[in-house]
Amino acid sequence: MRAALATALGLLSAAGVADHAVVETPTPRRTGPVQRDRCGAALTAQLEKDVASPIEDAMKKADEAYKCNAYLCRGYQLEDNLEGVQTVKAGDVLDFQIDLIAGHHPGYANVSVVDLATNQVIGEPLRSWADWPDSTSGPPRNDIDFNITLPDSLRSACDVAGKCAIQWYWWASKNRQTYESCVDFYLEQ
Ligand SMILES: *[C@@H]1O[C@H](CO)[C@@H](O)[C@H](O)[C@H]1NC(C)=O
Ligand SMILES: *[C@@H]1O[C@H](CO)[C@@H](O)[C@H](O)[C@H]1NC(C)=O
C-alpha cells in the first residue's frame, strides 16, 4: 500500500506540475467565434479551460479543424478582439501586470512586437528576462509588474490596426511549455 502510494507520488512529480501565467493588464486578446472557426472547437476549449495554461496542453487537442497558429498570440484572433486594439503614440509607456499563478519551472521571457502577417518579431525585444520568473526583484517585482515604451522606429510598421501586436512570451524551459499573451495596438501617425 505504502509502496503503491510512493509510486503514485513519484509518478505525479515526474509528470510535473504545470506552470501558469497570463497578462492581466493591459487587457490581452481573448477567444471568440473566429478562433473556434480557425483553430477548432476542441483546441479552443482546452485553451479556455484555463486562460493561463501552456499552449502545449492545448496542442494535444488539435484535430482536423486546427488551421490557425496557436503559437501566435495563443491562437486568439484579431477579429474577435477588434475592440481591444490600443491606440498609442510613439514614446508612450504601457504598464504591464502578469498574473503569475504558478511558476515552478523557470525559463526566459520577453516582450516583443510581432508582425501579425509574418509572425516575425520586429526589431529588438522591448523587454527580456534571462530568468523568469524572478521573485528576487523589487518590490515592485520587475518580472510581473513592469512597463514598456513603444519606440518611434515602429511607426511605419505598426501604422494601422491589425499589423502589430505586443506579445508577452514565457518559455518554461525545464518542462518545455510556452505561455503567451498579446495586446493589439497601432501607432498614431
Ligand atoms: C523572445 O520571444 C520569442 C517569441 O516571441 C522567441 O522566439 C525568442 O527566442 C525570444 N528571444 C529572446 C532573446 O529571448
Ligand atoms: C517604468 O518602469 C521604471 C522601472 O523599471 C520606472 O522607473 C518608471 O518610472 C516607469 N515609468 C512609468 C511612466 O511608469
Image (cartoon, grey):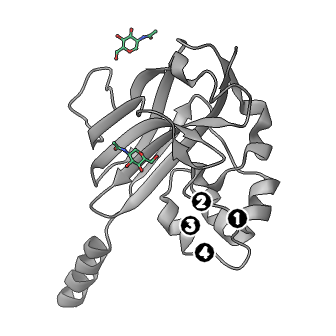
**Residue 150 visible to an observer of this rendering:** no
**Gap between marks 3 and 1, in whole Å?**
10 Å
Q: Give the image quadrant in which the ligand numbered 2 is located.
A: top left
Pointers 1 and 4 in contact (C-beta within 8 Å): no
**Gap between marks 4 and 3, in whole Å?**
5 Å
- Residue tagged by mark 1? 39
Q: Nearer the viewer, residue 89 or 54?
A: 89
Please name which of the two marks, 1 or 4, marks the residue nearer to the observer.
1
Q: Residues within 10 Å of mark 3 (few under 14, many from 20)?
A: some
Please name which of the two marks, 2 or 4, marks the residue nearer to the observer.
2
Q: Residues within 10 Å of mark 1 (few under 14, many from 20)?
A: many
Q: Position of residue 58 (x, y in %)?
A: 56, 67
Q: Quadrant of the C terminus?
A: top right
Q: Quadrant of the N terminus?
A: bottom left
Q: Is residue 166 left or right of residue 136?
A: right
Pointers 4 and 3 in contact (C-beta within 8 Å): yes
**Amino acid type of disc 1?**
Cys
- Residue tagged by mark 2? 70
Pointers 3 and 1 in contact (C-beta within 8 Å): no
Say which label, 1 or 4, has the lower sequence index. Answer: 1
Pointers 3 and 2 in contact (C-beta within 8 Å): yes
Pointers 1 and 2 in contact (C-beta within 8 Å): yes
Residue 17 lies in what quarter of the image?
Answer: bottom left
**Amino acid type of disc 4?**
Lys
**Residue 36 visible to an observer of this rendering:** yes
**Gap between marks 2 and 4, in whole Å?**
11 Å
**Residue at point 78% right, 45% down?**
80
Say which label, 3 or 1, has the lower sequence index. Answer: 1
**Amino acid type of disc 3?**
Ala
- Residue tagged by mark 4? 61
**Gap between marks 1 and 4, in whole Å?**
10 Å
- Disc marking residue 58: 3
